Image: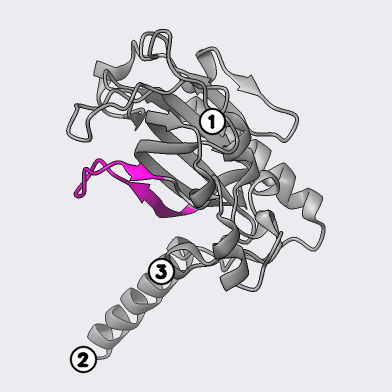
C-alpha cells in the first residue's frame, strides 16, 4: 500500500513539473517601449522566415514534417520593402491588376483577405509573435469584401461621436494606411469574384497603436500589438463629400 502511495505521489509531482514547463508565462510589458519595438522587429524577421505564400497568395507556415513546401520561397526571400515606420510590405508578383487603380489616403477601398494581430514577446532570448487574434477575415466564413474600413479612413462624424474629433490616430492604423497605398486596386471586382491575394503588409506595434488609447475594434486592446494583413484590393475610388 505504501509503495502504491509513493508511485501516485511521484506521478503527481511529475505531472505538476511538466505542467509548469508547458505553461506560458504571463506577458510583462517592458517598461522601455524600445524593448517592445525590438521584440516586434525580431518577431517580424522570424515570421518572414517561417512563412510563404501559396498559389492564391495565402500566408502559410512551413511544415516541419511535410517536404512538399520545401521548394517554396520564404517571405524573407521575396522582394519586400521596409518603410521608415518599420512596416514591411510584399507586392506579390503576378497578382497585381494592370494598370490598376491608384489608392489614395482619402479613398474608399474595398478589400478581401485576412488580418491577425500578434503580441511580440521574448522567447528563448528573442522576440516572437504570440497571442494570435483575428482582426479581419472575409475568406473563411463570410466572403463579402470589406468596404471603407475605419482603420484606413475614419469619418469626421465617427470621430465626433467618440469624442475624438480630429484624432485620426485613435482609429487608423498608420502603417497599414501607408503601405496599402503602395499597391494598386482592381477596377471594382465583383464581390463573388475568386480571390487572388496581392500581398502582405506587416505592421509593428509602433506603426499601429503602440501604447496609445485607441478604438476597441472587436472589443479588445491592441496595446503593443503588431498586425499582419494578407489581402487583395477589389476597388478604390474617390471619396464623396458625404463620406468624409
Where is residue 118 shown, x and y percent of the image? 51, 51
Mark 2 vs 1, N-terminal side:
2
What residue span does the magenta drawing correspond to?
A: 131-147
Q: Is residue 141 above or below residue 178?
A: below
User: Which dot marks residue 19?
Assistant: 3
Q: Residue at x 58, y 35 (%)?
A: 44
Mark 3 vs 2, N-terminal side:
2
Where is residue 7 shown, x and y percent of the image? 28, 78
Q: Is residue 17 above or below residue 242?
A: below
The residue sitting at the bottom extreme is: 1
Where is residue 88 shown, x and y percent of the image? 60, 29
Q: Nearer the viewer, mark 3 or mark 2?
A: 3
Q: Residues within 10 Å of mark 3 (few under 14, many from 20)?
A: few
The residue to which callout 1 is attached is 180
Q: Quadrant of the N terminus?
A: bottom left
Residue 40 sits inside the magenta stretch: no
Q: Residue at x 22, y 35 (%)?
A: 191
The residue to which callout 2 is attached is 1
Tell me, yes or no, if residue 77 can be seen here. Answer: yes
- Residue sitting nearer the eye, 58 or 151: 151
- Judged from the image, the secondary structure of the residue bearing numbered disc 3 is helix
Residue 146 sits inside the magenta stretch: yes
C-alpha distance separating marks 3 and 2: 27 Å
Dividing the picture into quadrants, the one containing residue 167 is bottom right
Amino acid at each position: 500500500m505504501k509503495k502504491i502511495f509513493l508511485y501516485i505521489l511521484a506521478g503527481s509531482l511529475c505531472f505538476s513539473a511538466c505542467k509548469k514547463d508547458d505553461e506560458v508565462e504571463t506577458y510583462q510589458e517592458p517598461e522601455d517601449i524600445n524593448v517592445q519595438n525590438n521584440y516586434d522587429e525580431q518577431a517580424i524577421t522570424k515570421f518572414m522566415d517561417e512563412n510563404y505564400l501559396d498559389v492564391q497568395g495565402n500566408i502559410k507556415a512551413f511544415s516541419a514534417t511535410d517536404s512538399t513546401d520545401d521548394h517554396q520561397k520564404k517571405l524573407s526571400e521575396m522582394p519586400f520593402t521596409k518603410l521608415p515606420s518599420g512596416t514591411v510590405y510584399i507586392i506579390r508578383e503576378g497578382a497585381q491588376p494592370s494598370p490598376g487603380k491608384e489608392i489614395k489616403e482619402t479613398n474608399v477601398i474595398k478589400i478581401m483577405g485576412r488580418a491577425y494581430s500578434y503580441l511580440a514577446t521574448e522567447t528563448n532570448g528573442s522576440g516572437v509573435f504570440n497571442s494570435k487574434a483575428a482582426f479581419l477575415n472575409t475568406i473563411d466564413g463570410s466572403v463579402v469584401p470589406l468596404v471603407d474600413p475605419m482603420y484606413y479612413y475614419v469619418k469626421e462624424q465617427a470621430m465626433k461621436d467618440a469624442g475624438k474629433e480630429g484624432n485620426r490616430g485613435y482609429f487608423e492604423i498608420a502603417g497599414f494606411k501607408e503601405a496599402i497605398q503602395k499597391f494598386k486596386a482592381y477596377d471594382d471586382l465583383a464581390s463573388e469574384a475568386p480571390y487572388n491575394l496581392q500581398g502582405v503588409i506587416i505592421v509593428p506595434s509602433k506603426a499601429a497603436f503602440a501604447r496609445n488609447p485607441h478604438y476597441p475594434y472587436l472589443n479588445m486592446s491592441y496595446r503593443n500589438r503588431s498586425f499582419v494583413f494578407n489581402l487583395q484590393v477589389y476597388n478604390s475610388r474617390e471619396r464623396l463629400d458625404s463620406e468624409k
